[in-house]
Image (spheres, rainbow, N blue to C red):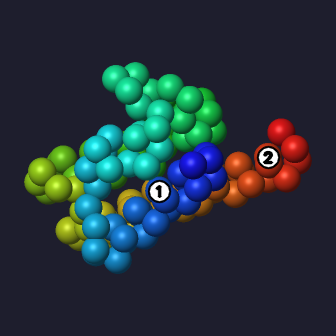
């Protein structure tokens, strides 16, 4: 799998969450984490894009914090309108990275 298809899998994961059909297991079911997270976060396209490892400074942090503070269940999924908004932010961010990688590929980088 190349980085673009890994990130496209992540967009699909967040779309399922937005539709109420999926949940977020963090590292366990994050497509890029499966390839780039082995005790440390290394080489992930999200980190390359944001400049921060472990999804710091991405919409994931707000999602994760809201899940813990407002809901606190083992499965992070859409429980309220705020969840839905935050999941959409995350999906859009994943899509931004897909677009960024495609532009890079087209530029021959
Ligand atoms: Zn919520």
Residue located farthest toward the bottom when viewing the structure as drawn: 19
Sort mark 2 into few (<14), some (14-19) or many (20+) by Cα contacts within 10 Å. Answer: few
Does residue 17 sit above or below 6 in this rendering? below
Residue found at x 46% / y 38%:
35
Residue found at x 28% / y 67%:
22
**Secondary structure of the residue carrying numbered label 1:** helix
Q: Is residue 24 visible?
A: yes
Do tag 1 and tag 2 residues touch (Cβ < 8 Å)? no
In percent of width and height, residue 91 lies at 48, 61
In percent of width and height, residue 82 lies at 31, 65
Does residue 40 sit above or below 65 in this rendering? above
Q: How many marks?
A: 2
Sort mark 1 into few (<14), some (14-19) or many (20+) by Cα contacts within 10 Å. Answer: many
Q: Please give the residue where the numbered disc 2 appears in the rendered image.
A: 104
In percent of width and height, residue 59 lies at 45, 49
Q: Please give the residue where the numbered disc 1 appears in the rendered image.
A: 10
**Secondary structure of the residue carrying numbered label 2:** helix
Q: Is residue 89 visible?
A: no
Residue located farthest toward the top when viewing the structure as drawn: 40
Residue located farthest toward the left when viewing the structure as drawn: 73
Residue located farthest toward the right when viewing the structure as drawn: 107
Does residue 4 sit above or below 28 in this rendering? below
Q: Quadrant of residue 108?
A: top right
In front of the other: 96 or 30:
30
* Quadrant where the image shows the C terminus: top right
**Which is more N-terminal, label 2 or label 1?**
1
Horizontally, residue 74 falls left or right of residue 76, namely: left
């Amino acid at each position: 799998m190349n980085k673009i298809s890994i990130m496209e899998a992540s967009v699909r994961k967040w779309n399922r969450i937005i539709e109420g059909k999926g949940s977020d297991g963090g590292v366990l079911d994050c497509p890029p984490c499966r390839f780039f997270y082995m005790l440390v976060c290394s080489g992930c396209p999200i980190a390359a894009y944001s400049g921060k490892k472990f999804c710091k400074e991405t919409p994931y942090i707000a999602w994760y914090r809201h899940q813990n503070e407002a809901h606190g269940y083992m499965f992070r999924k859409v429980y309220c309108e705020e969840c839905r908004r935050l999941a959409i932010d995350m999906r859009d961010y994943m899509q931004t990275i897909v677009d960024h990688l495609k532009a890079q590929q087209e530029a021959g980088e």
